[in-house]
Each structure stands twice: as structure tokens, then as C-alpha cells.
Image (cartoon, rainbow, N blue to C red):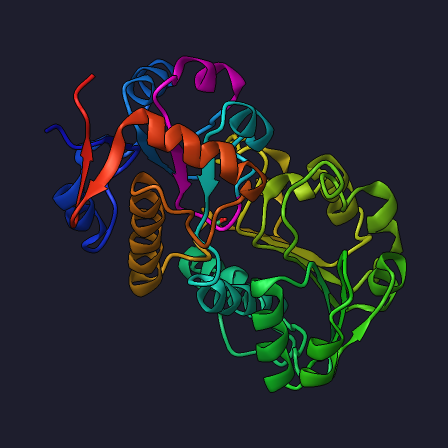
Amino acid sequence: MPKPRVFVTRHLPGDALDQLADKAEIAVWRNALPPGRDELVQEVARSDGVLTLLSDRIDDELLDRATRLLVVSNMATGFDNIDVVAASRRIVLVTRTPGVLSATTAEYTIALMFAAARRVVEGDRLVRSGEWKTWGPEVLLGRDLSGAMLGIIGMGGIGREVARRARALGMRVVYFSRNRKPGLERRHRMSFLRLDELLRESDFVSLHAPLTSETRHIIDDETLALMKSTAILVNTARGPLVDQGALYRALSLGRIAGAALDVTDPEPLEPNDPLLGLPNVIVTPHIASASVATRSRMGRLAVENLLEALAGRVPKHAVNRDIVRPWRERVRKSGVAILGDMIERQPD
Ligand code: GLV
């Protein structure tokens, strides 16, 4: 009996694909660049499951063609690349990979804070340009993290790991999020502030909120105007949380001191994007979760979610749990079922 067919939109690190290949017939997109729109639509249309990355747009039109599709397993904690409402309408389960990347992403966030505050990238550029002549008491003076106030926007798994590390570095921490987290406030000795208060008080502002219609451009002209002129903005979450035109204005006019962005809108930025012309901006290529161990863990979890779903079980990290009942029924009718340890697809 044929196994369920799964399309994987890029080669993954670690052994995740071997696990998947044991149980499913897999087609892997092996190019360095993501599949084009047509290829993605065609491949997904032929599949029972798809393992996607945040660079794959899964929208209404694509889902409309994917009549066989039961599950979209996104190898990311964020899932703004997927139209979850459209997926739910078609009784397609969406899953994600939270948790396993929180510590790694938090480490990178702290790395960007240090890099921007201590001018690491500017220093490297100075040496390479041959313009650095001698040690100087006033060369590239930066700011300390220790004693500074960090404002965290979004207190999910990554936000709390950033808070923990910041406290260990002697920073003071405040946060803003949809819901207050009194347990975390006590554990990390941090306080909740309104967004405007947080922006006024913080020396560093770090974004850790998901991208939704409420958080899009949460940093814009108005909110940037509240920040200290010495403040540094760090974004390791999603590019569109920041209105980049507004950020450019704030940075070039000295309204804030610097920014370190691992995510931008779009990704990548055009080479002539004005932000890239500013010395007080660091931009990296969306690598906050990119450690060897973490990317392997993300791959394994994405595969586990996918296989769980193809076995008719609701994975722990399902996003649209509200469709579970009709989804179970759909899986049953689809003929994708577990036989012993094997997941098999009944012949059409
Ligand atoms: C990465 O950006 C993720 O959402 O996992």
C-alpha cells in the first residue's frame, strides 16, 4: 500500500528527513532557494502533508488546490506565512515548532544587543578598512548592558529566555505583552509596563511578539518618538513589527541611537535600502535560531508534528485546535491511517 506523500520545501539539517522517509513517501525541494509559487502549488496539491519554512507562503489560493492536504507542519515558532483561517476553513491542521528554539534565539538577541551597544560590527569595519591607527581613549565608545533597562515587547517562550539572560547580566527588565505573567515577574524580578511607559524607560527595546494584525508596525513614527535618544532597538521576531521607513527616519535623525535587526521587511532587504547605508544599524540574515543543535531539533519536531498528524493524532503544537473534530473525521475518510507502526495510505 502506498505511504502518505509529503512535500518538504527544503533540505533540513540533522536526521529529521531520515525519520520522515521511513514512514512517508517524501519529495524534498533541494535547491538553496525556496520553490517558486507554481512548484509549491503543484507539489502541495499532490501531497497529504507539507513541511514548510517561514519563507513559504501558504495562502487561500494554494490551499484551494490542495484537496488532499491534511497537515501543514511549519518548521518555525512563528506561522504568519500561513493563512490559518483559510487552512481551518478547509480542515487542514497547522503545526509549529515552539520551545526548542527559545534559548538559542535569546542568546542571539543578547549577542545583537552587545554588538550594537559595543559597536562590534563598526569596529570590525574600521579595522578592515585600514583606517584604525591606534588605541584611543575615545575610539568607538559604546554603552554597557549591565545596569541598563531592557524593555521586552512580547513575553512568550523567547521573551522569557531573554529576560532570564538579561537579569544574569545585571540589566533591569520591564516587559509589555498581551497578558501579564505574574509568575515570571516574580521569577525574573521584572515588571509589567504599558507600551508607552516601556518605550520611555528603556535603554534597549527588544521585540518578541508574533506578527499579527495588532502587532504589525507596533514600532512606528509614534512609538519611536517615545524612545530615548540613546536607546537601541533589537528585532529578532518578524520584520513587519517595525515600520522601516519610520525606523530609518528615527535613526538618521538621531532620535534613537541604533538598531540591530535579524529580521526585516522584506527579507532580504534590497541592496540599496537606505537602512543599509546607516552606520548605526546591524542587519543579519534571520539566523537567530540558527545553531546546529537547534535547527536539528526544529527539523525533528516539525517531522514529529507531521507524522503525528498523518497518524490521525493531534500534535501538541497544533495551532488551529478548534478544527480537531472535523479534522479527525477528514483524516479517517482520507484513508491515511496507521497500520501497526506504519502509516499507510489506502489506494484511491
Ligand atoms: C523563526 O523566525 C521562527 O519563527 O521560528
Q: Is residue 71 magenta?
A: yes
Q: For the point 41% across and 50% down, which residue is it?
A: 315
Residue 148: where, in percent of width, then height?
73, 78
Q: For the point 58% across and 51% down, which residue is it?
A: 237
Q: Is residue 120 magenta?
A: no
Q: Is residue 185 left or right of residue 46?
A: right
> Closer to the camera, 152 or 131?
152
> Closer to the camera, 219 or 87?
87
Q: Quadrant of residue 63?
A: top left
Q: How many marks?
A: 0
Q: For the point 16% across and 21% down, which residue is it?
A: 347
- 257 up-or-down from 61: above or below: below
Q: For the point 57% across and 78% down, which residue is it?
A: 165
Residue 26: where, in percent of width, then height?
18, 33
Please state the extent of the stretch shown in magenta in the rendering: 59-78
Residue farthest along the left direction in this orientation: 1
- 286 up-or-down from 90: above or below: below
Asked if residue 5 can be seen in this view, the reply is: yes
- 212 up-or-down from 34: above or below: below
> Closer to the camera, 33 or 2?
2
Residue 98: where, in percent of width, then height?
48, 56
Residue 144: where, in percent of width, then height?
66, 79
Q: Is residue 272 left or right of residue 149?
A: left
**Which quarter of the rendering shows the N terminus?**
top left
**Which quarter of the rendering shows the C terminus?**
top left
